[in-house]
Image (cartoon, rainbow, N blue to C red):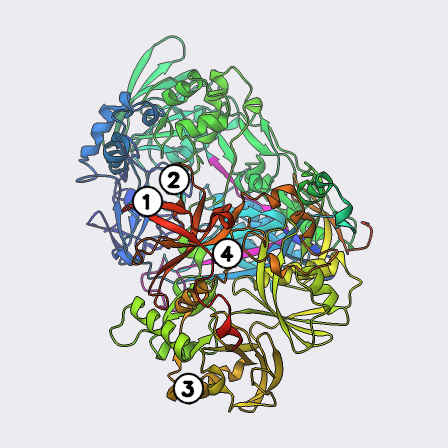
Amino acid sequence: MLLIPCPYCGPRPELEFTYAGEANISRPAEPESLSDEQWAAYLYQRTNPRGMHAERWRHVHGCGRYFNASRDTLSDQFQFSWKPGESPP
Amino acid sequence: MTGPFRTEIGGRIDRTRRIDFRFDGRLYSGHPGDNLASALLSHGVHLLGRSFKYHRPRGVLGAGSEEPNALVRVGSYESRATPNLRATQVEIHDLLVAESQNRYPSLSFDVGAINDVLSPLFPAGFYYKTFMWPAWGWRRLYEPIIRRMAGLGRAPTAPDADIYAQRYVHCDVLVVGAGPAGLAAARAAAQGGARVLLCDEQSEFGGSLLSEPDTTEAGRNRLAWRAATLATLAASDNVTLLTRSTAFGVFADNFVALVERVTDHLANPEPALPRERLWQVRARQVVLATGAIERPMVFAGNDRPGVMLAGAARTYLHRYGVRTGRRIVLATSADSAYGVAMDLHRAGLTIAAIADVRNEASGPLAAAARAAGLPLRTSTHIAATHGRLRIRGATLARNGTGAREKVACDLLLMSGGYTPTVHLYSQARGTLRFDESLGAFLPGGDTGILQVAGACRGIFATDVAIADGAEAGTVAAARTDPGGAPQPVRTISVPDSGALLAREAPCDRRAFVDFQNDVTTKDLRLAVREGFVSVEHVKRYTTAGMATDQGKTSNINALALVANERRMDMAAVGLTTFRMPYTPVTFGTLAGAARGNLFDPIRQTPIHAWAEDRGAVFEDVGMWKRARYFPAARETMAQAVARECRAVRTGAGLFDASTLGKIEVVGPDAAIFLERMYVNNFRKLAVGRARYGLMLGEDGFVLDDGVIGRLAPDRFHVTTTTGGAPRVLAMMEDYLQTEWPDLRVWLTSTTEEWAVVSIQGPRARDIIAPFVIGIDLAPQAFPHMAVAEGTILGVNLRIFRVSFTGECGFEINVPADYGSDVWHAIMQQGTVFGLTPYGTEAMHVLRAEKGYIIVGQESDGTATPDDLGLGWAIGRGKSDFVGKRSLARAAMRDPSRKQLVGLLTSNGETVLQEGAQIVTAANGNASIGHVTSAYFSTTLGRSMALAMISGGKARMGEKLLAPMLDRTHEVTVAPAMFYDPKGERLYG
């Protein structure tokens, strides 16, 4: 079971979290102005990298907050985590 | 009576006490400290099992958890029986009943042994190649026969009567394995101030210290050192000691699972004790001191009872005081065998021959054996063994020359060198490297949070292992205090050893590599010859290493054979993946208390007890128990549902809607927020009014629905589907926290704060009006989709005028603690009006008569609002909401999409099956949709169905077909609204 660093609460076991997909994908401010292709890319296209991955987690059984974390998809090791709106350390 | 093979003195057994136990019905005796294998061996019993595939007689091979052959079933009651236990790990106690497995009618005479004669017919993968004809033969003929013939123990037929416990612990340093290295590591870590947990799978700590002679090479007394170290540990407050506890899995970030066997070794355990306890340990540092397992030699007939690992014979001698035979042949490719030979020689056993496959045997141990006059033959291998239920002799052959010699013996010991037990290290994703001089894979290094010490990293000499363990313990403790003194480092390196890996083994159908799965050298060669290149594929094709012992004694030998066959280096061949569990773990331990009613949390509404008293039949909806219907005396479900529906349509019905998800949305921007989350318009929703809300995913598909009432300009009472509440709240939180953090809105789950009593029917208003204070319920004052706050029976009330039945209805929300009282009062008041409680089944029928959808029943995650006939809910003039952009994509407006319609069967008695496919008469093979809901409607006097049909809205009146198991039914497409289409009853 992973130990996940919540930027608000500190390291907590994986059981307390839910995964929330890739980070840094903002909802377009004006979806109507996007082409179908652009909108489909926002909806469905993700980087799925081999290595470091910026992703979102929610400490659902804790503080309830969403945050960002950087995790190596090969080793499952978390590098660091940061609050929404902040830059990664 | 003490067994005739018991030594006169020595060993860790308590000779002053006798234990009687049964094996295959016969009474035997042993002593406290014995396990089943040692006790039986003390009586000269070597034959303990039959092999998996060929039913060959098998004896004890090892002395611990590596044992592949001696599997037994323990327990005289089905409810407490456990199959496939290793006799080497089963501690004996009075009342112990064990029996052998996979044999009929008896262990010494087993008709299944015919398989051994027929073994040329069963090479690797035989089931893929034969039994192909006739086509039905595999399932009905061959597989049942093969399953009966091949196999391990029989699963118990009764539910497990034992209880199992689970606990979580945190520690600074977890030390796995309490041999010399582990004990030293634990002591050093404890002295460094760390909180230490030390576990070992055996009944007492000590590991190899218990198996080897008294004095080490450096002159240290093993048992005295052990006793002193244990005394220090036991006296330390910061140390927890766990015997009989196997670390069976290492997971990410030093999360380690242990299973502690609490009562299996006791004759009369306290009833309150759990049989086993799962420890889930989060350790800041882990030291693996898991030791090493000896490798068998591979030669024809290496599996007869009486063929044993050399180190095991030494363990039985020193630890259990048991001579495993009288006249011994040793087959070896490693120096360690000479130490064993000298021990046995000193204990008075006859060493008939030592066959060393290596060209020379140098080193101090071999020299000592020579000096003692033991008959040592180099360049010699075992060509054959003799005997049936016990070995009688072995044929030795000179390498290359063919000169043969037959030697009589009753014990043949094998030593192919030691394989470090890297299972847990590998599970922790440590990298392994192949060490040629050891002929084994070794841990590549420590991972920063996990270290390896002692034999597990190739350090076999006790004195060096102790020093190595102490260093590991010191380093681990220091790492848990990063602000402390300069970090110590490990200094001891792995020495060379003289083992020769048995890479060139004879190709023979009786030269066993994997004893538990009956895989021979011939099978492995066949696999390579047939083109299996990867060791992972060879493993799966031959099943080598896939038995319950996970190849503890066989993996390296199998890899060596594959490497040799493919003319490759071992390092290039690689290693198969180690997976948890290290040894089999009971389902009981993994489940713990989560059995029966505790398997999953059960959610009950405040009205549950009343419904139970009333004889309700419940159904599971998510974790909720919901009353499905309330049968009166001798009523069938259909009769009860018909009666409940009639009551709602003609008088009134009372329904427990407490399971509805509820979210309180509060804040100055609450209306803006809801307007973005739902397709509907909320900014213009007046206080005191409610609206049907439809929520989409960003992909445009319907996700959830519910009623949303505005209680104040900045306060909304949102309801969701019963199952959808957590999902909806999570999605709302996501958007609020990450997309629109500027919105001043707060969300609170209030699902369990409110009990919801729904009263529906033409008499509903008459029944509740006398109770409701502060709200005028008259139709003009409180119309359909009105909401208000007041009191009922003196408690706070939120009342909605809403309907999921098509009748005039009210949803009465009261604080959950008062739900039962309010329900009782309304039931009592309603008696004169014929008020009838109804369940979810009647609710389903009533809403289907009106064509009201249930998200997840009519919709399946690919339905748009339009598909479901809910396009009207989308607020006009809204620039954006979640999912809006997706609705504009061409595919979402395709007229051939599946759309919600009603279906009426030609025969009104026929109720279609939910999920039935719909086809046209013109093309009976292509489904154009499916039935989502189907019921018999008492109100209509006939059946009805809802369906999602391709281009359904344009097919009104069209005749379609619904093929079902009995026959194909004709159906007519109708609007998805069967009752009161103008809504006169709803608004009345």
Q: CA distance from mark 1 to mark 2?
A: 10 Å
Residue under label 3: B830
Q: Which mark is residue B856?
A: 4
Residue A88: x, y in percent?
80, 49
Q: CA distance from mark 2 to mark 3?
A: 72 Å
Q: Which mark is residue B67?
A: 2
Mark 2 touching mark 3, by CB under 8 A? no
Look at the image and give the residue range highlighted in magenta: B265-293
Mark 2 touching mark 4, by CB under 8 A? no
Task: Tell me the amino acid under the disc marked 3.
Answer: Gly
- Please identify, in this view, whether the residue under mark 1 or under mark 3 is nearer the observer: 3
- Subunit bearing disc 2: B
Residue under label 1: B37
Tell me if residue B282 is in the magenta stretch.
yes
Q: Is residue B984 left or right of residue B305?
A: right
Mark 1 touching mark 3, by CB under 8 A? no
